[in-house]
Structure formats: structure tokens, C-alpha cells
């Protein structure tokens, strides 16, 4: 990372506003006004050849006329001037460009954008935008944007791909009481993208939590890598996940990838916490920016109302952090601070009689107890208690406990007094929400963060007994013939170079060869028509299974050819495949796509109905280690079948995980060549008996003629 | 419904406060104070033998001393006096008791509660509570509770089983700006329960929407019936739906019923809209109390920001109201009020340049257009536009359109100005929310309401070719033998009385009888050990399938008996069942439970893995008509299998729906006898070929010795 350059761009010590104006209503006016109003302490250089002064600052005809150094140049001049201005900025030694102007790729002028970036890079500059609102930073007193004011101060940084949303969220930070140190509008991402922002914010000392509104990533893999390397929580709201508009795909696996599936996998693999909607982004950001991760599964709920306690219990299950009963000793201690009819289980119900003291004692004890990994405190406003009193009791308990490495979230349900008390709690570092479900959801985010971080891992150990060169040779040969789809036999050959167990399959181009191959492989065998023009072999009468004798091979060879001709007279026939007949077993499907954002990604599911009707599949960005692959087997809803449900013997999941891992390595290594693949079916035998790929398909990328 | 009595209880013209007090801090003080502060216009009679006057009102020793009529008596005296006080109220001719006092069934004194209700009923009185907060009504200026003030006025009525939550929600109505006309605390529901409240609120002219917080219903069927008969929207937040704590069950079906499944079914069947959490209850109540139902699937979204538009699109899919593109003519018209780079598809993106005029034109046109069934208007606060201006444009457009039979919801994302504008919208009858997802969710509630109302139906036409008497005779005979579980043969006999197709099964108690029966039924047959002590017949070596000759029958008869003895020496052997061997087909499972809340409820799922591992089942409160049963077949995730997926022939769903419907009638008619049932498997053949119950199980209720 070009740290110094990015610091200049994102925390500039001096700013030129190119297109600065004295005319109210112009963006060039607003940006200068905002710099003044935010009390920016750095140098401000308006650039406008037609003005001597802009809003009290001396104005310059060009950046080249500015006497001092310029860290960042905010460009609000029309797009057509952008290349020239960039050139001048480069000559001046500007570190970064904040291009607010629109009129670039969003209206089809990608060429202009590329020219700007190329010019900027020639001078070592980085470009934010174009088509953005600008940047806002509380810790730098810097509003270099046309958003009206700095956000409510806080510890999170928001990076938004939507400018309109950033402006609206800016205003919203005050009404929602969720603070941000920085807001960064990222727009067209011609140069600086989410991957860069995650990397830079990861080392930025004024940022505690990275909050992202993403419509689509560029360079998904670098984003994942940078996210993995960051020691700060990252929360992402990804929009555009509805099926409406998902692209058509060539393979089975492709059609299952849909709009959101691979993003889901990638975020989980990279340790990124998800937000379900806009409010959830605010709510979870608040928790992640104020509290440490929840490093275990034991969440304790303390409440003064049974109703909200039950709602919290339901929510806990819904959000993946189900409640467990507290151990005896915890219950015994908590029983001391509640009436007889209270409950010390979990939720701990102090009853409506609970005042500050009971809350404070219970919270202090529970928060300090080893069993508790995270504490959710609920309060229903009553006529007898003062919400502020309760809030102060909670805060004092947390402080006196001396515990700083486990999280607490709070919910008060009530009116103005509760709102005020919750605001006070947030100001004192304790996230508080107006619904029990939300407090639980926020705690779930802290748990997800810890859990994702533990599991997050992109690289597994590589298998060394693979022959990438041989695979590439097979592909190259197929390309010579102008093919974009490998035949089943070619596909299987590629699979074998990566140590994948495949049912042996050979091409026979005559009856005699068929018999010879059948005898070499050993009966029974399967015979299949091989033709690039016949995709549905069974429909064409082109498949014979359980062929047991040479006489049958002769007979079926002729029959298959006859059927094929009857099915499609002009079909090009390559021959008849002679295939080892694997004994039947549990069918699974492995497949892959080469995702435009994340690259090679592997899919796993159970065969037949499970994939086709129930869509019970799971994806990972490749490669995956055998351990991660094993987790994929457990991830699908039907996972119990492989573990040996309904009295059946467990299947060889170890072998299957290795197959998946090798498969993922293959599609990664050959990611420049392979578009999509299917291994369908793969048969999995009982433990110790392995697995075998019965049918295989590789679709190549179209990048070569 | 005893309308006059309930009116007296819930909208009293005169109130006695039994236990009224002059001591601040006592509930008897608070209730009188609240009646004064809410400016209650009816007569108030404090009852306290030790005071001459309470807070300015003349006090009486007993209700019997009060000169005028008393509609409602609020009881705050200790539980031990409740029966005597009830007696006096009865003698006085009080209509209803509002028993705030606790110390009844919630602390194990169900007896006391029953005595009070019995006494009250003797005098024709109804009882609300005990263990409640009281009742609050804006339209009656009546706060007969210890909640501190009347809620923000509105058109909804909230009935809450949790008192603490009611008080907290009361305060919360002001901060959330969601108005209620009434709040009713229902507590222990010793007499008046949710079914009563739904019925009474259904005819109450000051209630437009019925909002319920439910922990558990009493008398679920009457609740459903009353909900069905109500022409007002009902929205319910049901807590306690987590698996944690679901009861153990005897049958397969029972174990699948879980905590929430039958509630889900019952609410849908009764046309009740669900709330997912507390905030959602407020949000949906606001929409349902202000807007008409959405009577079609076409929801149009108008926005000034692409970001919130995409979020709304995602939310639409998530909440079951996916967006469709607007027709050409609509797009052409809308295109007139946006710049070139706007979009007239759906979402309609007016762009950030949109001011009041564009909003107003678009909203007015779209709202009036026939294609649009519901309109969601989104706005992101910008520096250039005034939120109040936009709000007024939207309101005026709706008003000028003259349309009142379709719904609109709004979301503004922004700061204080947006909040103020949204408040103004709500005051003008347009529900407005601070997130696009919430506005879409609220519209989804209005769609659910319309859809549920269309589908809602508890009664189908009855099959008349059933023989309930014969079924009861079989059960009675089984009970004579002290049995609580019918044998397979007995179960099948009961099934047959309801016209269910069962695989013929007869009991053989000797080898010769076995052969005779086998020949009567026709080979091949199935032979099964019949013993109340052997549940897992296969494990005991007690099953032989595909038995083809009399020689085999002889041989297997001996073998089965030998195996059974080896398996369990002291097992009571009834004989060997000789069963018609139905040709194999698609396996499904039908079952039932007798739910403590809703009574007989029928379950459907696909056999084997689908039920046991994927839990892919659906429930309905019985009975269901064949049409409703057909919908069950489509409801499960694997439903496509029955429709004929993957090139297979469609299954006989018509026949299966009839089986389900007859089954549901059977368990309903015999609901006093039957606890749980399983028909597992039921085999379904191709269209026109019917279905057959292969194995059957009936578990009786334990109510008779």
C-alpha cells in the first residue's frame, strides 16, 4: 500500500478545490463552505482562473500556481477538463484526487475515467471517484464534500458506493445517535476501491470499525485478502441480492450461483460481518465500534420483564446465538437480587420490582463471571423506576467489574426518558437499542465477528502431487480443435492431473476397440455415445449400463450408433466411451464457476432432487483446505445424510473433503482457462471406501479464438 | 357475545375503584389519579371503608353502598378478598371486573381465580385479568390502569399478555409516533381472552386495527373463528417460538410440530398477519391502521436514490412481494418527470434531482394507475431538497388522485428534517418509516392481510360417506382392552371408516390362517409381526416383504415368530399381519397432533429424508378442504417432486389432497378420542392412479382409564 499517498488523499493536510466558486448553489461553492464550516485546519487552495479570492481564500488559476504542497485535490470541474487537470495535479506533486464531478463511466465515458487514472498513476497519484460526494472526517475537522455537515462523531468509518445514501446517512447519524469518524464516498471506483479502503482503514488509528455499503465489488479477491489481514471488525450491507436480474449461466452450477450466494461465501471466508438492511447496518456498526467481540457461545440475558425476555430468547435463536441455562453457581448468586418469583435461569428475570441496585449487582456479577461470554441487559420502562438511574447502574457495574474483553449490549423499551437514558449509555460506550431483538442482533454481530475471524482463511495447504502442466496441455490441445467445452473424456483427464478419482473412461472408435477396452477395464462396463452434438445422451438412446460380455459390447456398439443417427442424422460422432461401472452409492455434485468478482468458486451439494429442487448447495471462493471442505459437507441442510442418518453407515466424508479440496485447487490454478465445471454425479462410499467422479464437464473461458 | 356486558367492562360509563387510596405510591392511588388525569367523564366511585373521600371523590365502604350504576369495577385489593368483593359486585349489578391485583394462577392459586370467575359468571359479569395493568382508551378519556398516561392517539387497539411490555409500549407510542386508541392488559386471561377481545374489538367503532402481543392463546379455535369473522386487520406478535422448551411428543408428527409450527398455520388460516419482533409490531400496526389492504401483487417503488431503490428491491423479495417491471405505458408517462439518466422501470428512480414537482406528478399518476396495487415512495434527504416539501407533495398527490382503496407507504432516510416530515405524513394518514426495508415490509403486511383474508377459511365441505360411529366402535373396543395405542390393523380399520385407501391388512393367528388370508388378498404379500411390545418390527426380524407362495408363507410365519421370541422373550404376540403388497411409488407422510391450543391439526410431508432430516413439512389446523389440502402439497419445499419434476410423471395430487382432507375430517370428528396419528408411508401413484396408506398408527388420548 502506498501509505503516504493514501494518507494524503484521505487525511489531507492541504486541499485544493479545483472549480471552487463564489456562487452559492454551485458544488464548488459548497465544498469550500463546508471546509470552512468544519473548521478544517489545513491549507485550502481554491483553484479558479476567473476569481482572485473564493470565500476569503486566495484563489489560483491552476494548482501549478499554488505556493505550498497540496495533499488532495477536490475536482468539481466538468468531466471534459479532468484529464488536463489531472496532468497539472501530477506535475504539482498532488498526492490524491477526490473527483466529485460526474460524467464518466456512469454515463458511458469509461474511456475518460481510464485516461484520468492512467495519468494519475503516471505521477503516483491515487484517485477517489469520480461521481462522488467527497470525504468527511471528524478527527481531521474536514468536510471535503457537498454533504451538508460532518456526521455525529464516533469510532466507525463508513464507505458508501451510493452518494445519495451517504448524504442521507450523514444526517441520519444524529437522529439515530450512531457516530462515525469518517464518511467516504467511493462512487465509480475508477482507482481506489473497497479493497484499498479496507486496507487503509485497517491501519488508520482513528477508525475502530469499518462499515461498508456495497453495490458491487471490484477485485473481490484482494478485498477478501485485505479484510482477512485487518484486525478491525468489518460490516457490510450488500445490496442487489435479489434473484431478479441474476445472469443466465451455462452450467448447472452456474445457474445455482445466483446473485448473492458467492458474496455470502466470500464475506464469511473473509471474516466480514453482514448487515441485513440499512437500520441493521447502523445498529451493528454501533456495537462493533464500541464493544469487543463475543469470544464464546454463552450469552446471558438480564431483564425486568418476562415479555421482553421471551422475545430476546426467540431472537437469540433466530440470530444464531441460542440461549443456554446459566450454571448453578451463577443462578444461586443472581437469585440474591430478585424476589422469590423472579428467575435466575437465562433470561434472568429480575421482575418489574428491579431498581438500580438489583440491576447493578446482577450486571456486575454476571459480567465478571467466566461462564458469561456476552451480556444483554433489557429494561422495560416502569412507573416505579427511572431509566437514567438504571442506565447509570448498568454503566457503573460494567466499569467496576474491570472487564474490558467481553461485550455488553442493552435495550430499553419505553418513551422519552428511556431514549435519553439510552443516549447516555451510548455516550458512555455501551450500545443501547429500542428493541430487545436489536440488542440480541447486535450481540450476534459481535459473536459472528469472533466466529468468522476464527474460521476465516483463504489459503489451505496445497497438494503437491498435481500436474498443472499436463492439465494445461490437455486444455491447449482441446483449444486447437476450436473447442470451448472439453469432452467428458478430456475433462476426466484434467481431473486426474489433480489427483481426483475418476471412473476410468476411454474412447472406442470401433467395435473391436470397444471390446478390447471393456476387457482391459473389466466388466461390467458402461457405454456412452460421444458427440459434441448430442448433449442428452440418454434421450438419444446413447447409453448402455451394466454391459457384461463382449457379445453385448458388439451388439450395443452398433445399436448406440444407430440410435444416435436416428436421433440426429448429422451429429458428429467421435466414438463410444467405454467406462468403468462404479458400484452405486450416495450421489453428490461438485461444481464450479469463475465468478466475475471473486474468481474460481467451488460448489457442493447432494445429487438429484437436493440440488435441482431444494437448491441445497453451498459455495466457497476457491481454494479450500480439506478442513474447510469438510465444513462444506456439514453446511448443507442434507449434511446429516453423509454423516450417516437413519441408521445408514456414515459416508467417507474425509475422502470427499479431499476431493473437494483438490477440485478447488484445480479450478484455482487453471482459473485463467476454466469458466465452469460440473462433476455430477460423484459417488461417495462408506467410510474408508472413498469417492469417485462418474461424469465430468469442463467449460473453457472464451478468451482465445 | 354479551355485547352490553363487554361494553360495560371495556368502555365503562362509570367505574368503581375497589381499594382506592389516598396514599401516593399505592396502586389504588395511581388508578384514581390516572382516571382524573385522563379527564375521564364518567362517574368514579372509590371503594375504601377507611376513607370518607379519595382524591376529591366521595368514598364508599362497599360497592353495595354506591348510589348509581357501576359498569366496571377495578379491583386492587389483595387476592384473598377477591371472591367476597366479586360477590358484592355481582349483587350490585356491576358489568365487568378489571382485576389488577396479582396473587392468582401466576403464583399457583388457580383455584382462587376459578372461584372469582365462577362467582362473576353467576351474576353475568365478565372478568379481565387478574394480574393486569388495566385498560386505557383515548376515545373514552379513560386511563383505568397504573400505566402513567394514555398512549399517543391513533386508530389501533393493542391487547397485551405482558403488563410490563404494555407499560413500556405505552410510553413508546410517543417516541415511535405510532398511535393507539386503546391498550388492554389481558394478564392471566381467567375469563376474557384473546378470542373475546378480537370479537369485541371487531365490532368496536373506535378500533381500526387489532394489534396483539401473545405469549400463549387459550381456546385457539374460537380465536381463529372470531379472527376470521372480523373485517378488521389483526396483527400478532407471538413470543416463545424458540425450539428451546418445546415439549417431547409421542409420535413422529408430534416431534415435528415444535413450538411455533401450529401457531404459524393457525394464524395464516385465520387471516392474522404476523409481526416478527416488537419494532415490526409497531411498524405494521401503523400501516394496517392507516391504509387499506394491497389487493394485488403489483407494488411500485418510486425513489430519488438508486441505493435505497436496490435495498427496497431486495427487501421486496425477502418479504414476499417481489417487484415486477411496470408496463410500457406507465414507464412512458413516468419518464416525463425525470432526467434522461433516471429509470422508469421498477424501482422508478427520479434521481437526486427530483424535487416536490417530480415526486408529486409521479406519485399522483402511479397511484391512480390500474396496474399499481400498492405504492412505496422512498426519499433520501439531499442538500437541495426540503423533506417537508417532498412530504407535502406526496400527500397532495395521494389526495388529488382521489384513490382511497389502495395503500401507500413511505420511507425517508435522513436527519431531523426528514423525521419531522415523516411525522407530518403519519399525522396525515400516510405511514412513513426511517428505512426503505421497513416501508416495503409494511406494504408486505398490507399484502399479507389481503392474501390471508382471501385464503382464510376453516371449514371445507364435509365428506358424507364416512362412518364416525363405526370408528368410535373400533376405538371403544380397543379401550376395553386397556389399550391407548391402536394396533396397525385397528388403526387401518378406523382409517377405512373415513374412506381412506389403506393397504388391506388382516391378522393371522396360525400358519393356516396366514395362508388362507394371503390367498384371499393375492400374492405377493407382506408379513409383519403384531405385538404391542415390538415397536421396531424390522429390527426384530419381524417383517417379510414380497412373499409369493404358500410355502413361503408357512416358512416365514415360523421364522417371524422365532425371531420375535429371540428378540424379546416375553413379548406378547398377537399374531402375524398379512398385508397386501402395494407397488412401490412416491412416499409421503401424513400425520396429526391434537394441539393443546388449536386441537386436531394435520401434517404433510414427503417421506424419509425429507421429513426426518430436512423437516420439510407443513401443518394445518383441521379440518381442511381438498383445495386447502392441495395447497399443502405445494407448500413444502419438495412440492415440485409431486408436480412431476426432473422428467418424472406428475403424481396423483388430486387423490392425495382428498386423502388429506378426509384424514383431517377424521381427526377432527374423533378429536375427543385421538391424540396423535401417523400414516407413514402413504404411497402416491401417477395421475389418476390414486394413493394408498401402507402403515397406520393411532395413539388415543388418555382421558379414560
Image (spheres, coloured by chain):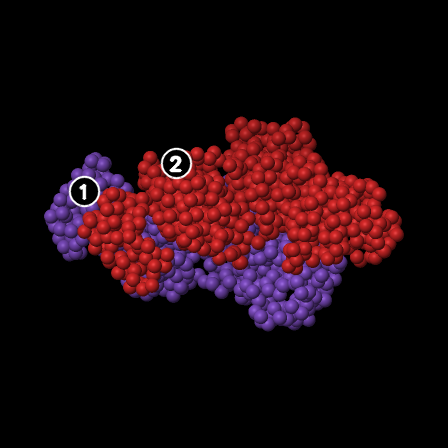
Chain colours: A red, B purple
Q: Nearer the viewer, residue B471 or B493?
A: B493
Disc 1, SS: helix
Locate the N terminus of chain A and report the quarter of the image it occupies.
top right
Label 1 or label 2, whichever lies nearer to me, is 2
Is residue B110 visible in the rendered image? The answer is no
Name the residue located 14 percent from the left edge and 55 percent from the top edge.
Answer: B519
Specify the subunit that label 2 lies on.
A
- What mark, if any, has residue B568 been given in the picture? none
Residue at image mark 2: A654
Q: Is residue B267 visible?
A: yes
Do badges 1 and 2 share one subunit?
no
Q: Is residue A653 left or right of residue B301?
A: left
Left or right: residue B215 versus residue A555 is: right
Viewer-closest of B244 and A513? A513
Which residue is at 16% across, 47% downward? B509
Q: Residue at x 12, y 46 (%)?
A: B554
Report how far apart the C-alphas of labels 1 and 2 lie in the structure.
Answer: 40 Å
Residue A301 on image: x %, y %? 57, 37
Say left or right for B363 vs B324: right
Q: Is residue B203 positioned above or below A484 on the image?
A: below
Residue closest to the eye, B457 or B584: B584
Image-based side of B126 in relation to B30, left or right: left
Q: Which residue is under mark 1?
A: B560
Secondary-structure class at tag 2? helix
Q: Quadrant of residue A482?
A: bottom left
Q: Position of residue B39 (x, y in %)?
A: 72, 55
* Residue positioned most to the front: A480
The image quarter containing residue A290 is top right
Amino acid at each position: 500500500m502506498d501509505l503516504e499517498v493514501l494518507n494524503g488523499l484521505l487525511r489531507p493536510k492541504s486541499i485544493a478545490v479545483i472549480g471552487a466558486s463564489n456562487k452559492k448553489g454551485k458544488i464548488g461553492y459548497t465544498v469550500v463552505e463546508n471546509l470552512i464550516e468544519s473548521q478544517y485546519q489545513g491549507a485550502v487552495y481554491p483553484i479558479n482562473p476567473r476569481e482572485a479570492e473564493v470565500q476569503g481564500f486566495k484563489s489560483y488559476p491552476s494548482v501549478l500556481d499554488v505556493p505550498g504542497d497540496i495533499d488532495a485535490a477536490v475536482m468539481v470541474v466538468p468531466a471534459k477538463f479532468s484529464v488536463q487537470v489531472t496532468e497539472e495535479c501530477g506535475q504539482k506533486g498532488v498526492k490524491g484526487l477526490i473527483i466529485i464531478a460526474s460524467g464518466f463511466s456512469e454515463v458511458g465515458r469509461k474511456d475518460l475515467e481510464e485516461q484520468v487514472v492512467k495519468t494519475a498513476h503516471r505521477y503516483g497519484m491515487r484517485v477517489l471517484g469520480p461521481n462522488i460526494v467527497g470525504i468527511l472526517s471528524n478527527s481531521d475537522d474536514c468536510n471535503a464534500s457537498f454533504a451538508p455537515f460532518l456526521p455525529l462523531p464516533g469510532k466507525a468509518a463508513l464507505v458508501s458506493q451510493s452518494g445519495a445514501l451517504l448524504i442521507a446517512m450523514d444526517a441520519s447519524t444524529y437522529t439515530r445517535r450512531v457516530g462515525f469518524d469518517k464518511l467516504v464516498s467511493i462512487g465509480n471506483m475508477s482507482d481506489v476501491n473497497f479493497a484499498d479502503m479496507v486496507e487503509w482503514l485497517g491501519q488508520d488509528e482513528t477508525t475502530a470499525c469499518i462499515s461498508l455499503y456495497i453495490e458491487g465489488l471490484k477485485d473481490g479477491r484482494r478485498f477478501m485478502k485485505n479484510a482477512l489481514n485487518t484486525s478491525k471488525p468489518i460490516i457490510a450491507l450488500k445490496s442487489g441480492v435479489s434473484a431478479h436480474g441474476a445472469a443466465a449461466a451455462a452450467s448447472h452450477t452456474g445457474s445455482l450461483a445466483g446473485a448473492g450466494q458467492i458474496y455470502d461465501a466470500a464475506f464469511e471466508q473473509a471474516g466480514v460481518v453482514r448487515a441485513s438492511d440499512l437500520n441493521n447496518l447502523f445498529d451493528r456498526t454501533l456495537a462493533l465500534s464500541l464493544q469487543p467481540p463475543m469470544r464464546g457461545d454463552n450469552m446471558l440475558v438480564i431483564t425486568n420483564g418476562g415479555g421482553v425476555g421471551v422475545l430476546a430468547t426467540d431472537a437469540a435463536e433466530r440470530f444464531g446465538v441460542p440461549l443456554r441455562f446459566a450454571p448453578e453457581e451463577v443462578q444461586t448468586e443472581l437469585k440474591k437480587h430478585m424476589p422469590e418469583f423472579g428467575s435466575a435461569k437465562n433470561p434472568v428475570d429480575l421482575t418489574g420490582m428491579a431498581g438500580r441496585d438489583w440491576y447493578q449487582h446482577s450486571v456486575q456479577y454476571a459480567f465478571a463471571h467466566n461462564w458469561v461470554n456476552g451480556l444483554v441487559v433489557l429494561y422495560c420502562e416502569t412507573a416505579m423506576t427511572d431509566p437514567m438511574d438504571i442506565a447509570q447502574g448498568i454503566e457503573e457495574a460494567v466499569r467496576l467489574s474491570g472487564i474490558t474483553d467481553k461485550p455488553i449490549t442493552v435495550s430499553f423499551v419505553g418513551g422519552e426518558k428511556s431514549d435519553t437514558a439510552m443516549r447516555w449509555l451510548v455516550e458512555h460506550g455501551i450500545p443501547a437499542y429500542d428493541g430487545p431483538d436489536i440488542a440480541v442482533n447486535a450481540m450476534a454481530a459481535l459473536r459472528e465477528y469472533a466466529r468468522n475471524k476464527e474460521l476465516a482463511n483463504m489459503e489451505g495447504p496445497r497438494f503437491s502431487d498435481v500436474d498443472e502442466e499436463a492439465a494445461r496441455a490437455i486444455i491447449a490441445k482441446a483449444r486447437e480443435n476450436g473447442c470451448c467445452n472439453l469432452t467428458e473424456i478430456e475433462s476426466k483427464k484434467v481431473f486426474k492431473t489433480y489427483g481426483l478419482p475418476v471412473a476410468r473412461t476411454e474412447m472406442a472408435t470401433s467395435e473391436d476397440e470397444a471390446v478390447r477396452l471393456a476387457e482391459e477395464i473389466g466388466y461390467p462396463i458402461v457405454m456412452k455415445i460421444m458427440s459434441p452434438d448430442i448433449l442428452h445422451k440418454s434421450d438419444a438412446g446413447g447409453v448402455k449400463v451394466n454391459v457384461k460380455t463382449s457379445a453385448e459390447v458388439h451388439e450395443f456398439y452398433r445399436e448406440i450408433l444407430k440410435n444416435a443417427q436416428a436421433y440426429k442424422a448429422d451429429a458428429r460422432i467421435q466414438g463410444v466411451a467405454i467406462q468403468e461401472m462404479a458400484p452405486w452409492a450416495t450421489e453428490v455434485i461438485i461444481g464450479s464457476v469463475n465468478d466475475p468478482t471473486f474468481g474460481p468458486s467451488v460448489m457442493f451439494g447432494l445429487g438429484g432432487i437436493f440440488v435441482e429442487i431444494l437448491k441445497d448447495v453451498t459455495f466457497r471462493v476457491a481454494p479450500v483446505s480439506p478442513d474447510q471442505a469438510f465444513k462444506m459437507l456439514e453446511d448443507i441442510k442434507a449434511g446429516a445424510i453423509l454423516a450417516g442418518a437413519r441408521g445408514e453407515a456414515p459416508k467417507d466424508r474425509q475422502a470427499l473433503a479431499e476431493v473437494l479440496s483438490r477440485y478447488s485447487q484445480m479450478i484455482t490454478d487453471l482459473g485463467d482457462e476454466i469458466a465452469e465445471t460440473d462433476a455430477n454425479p460423484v459417488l461417495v462410499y462408506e467410510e474408508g471406501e472413498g469417492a469417485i467422479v462418474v461424469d465430468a464437464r469442463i467449460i473453457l473461458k472464451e478468451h482465445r479464438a
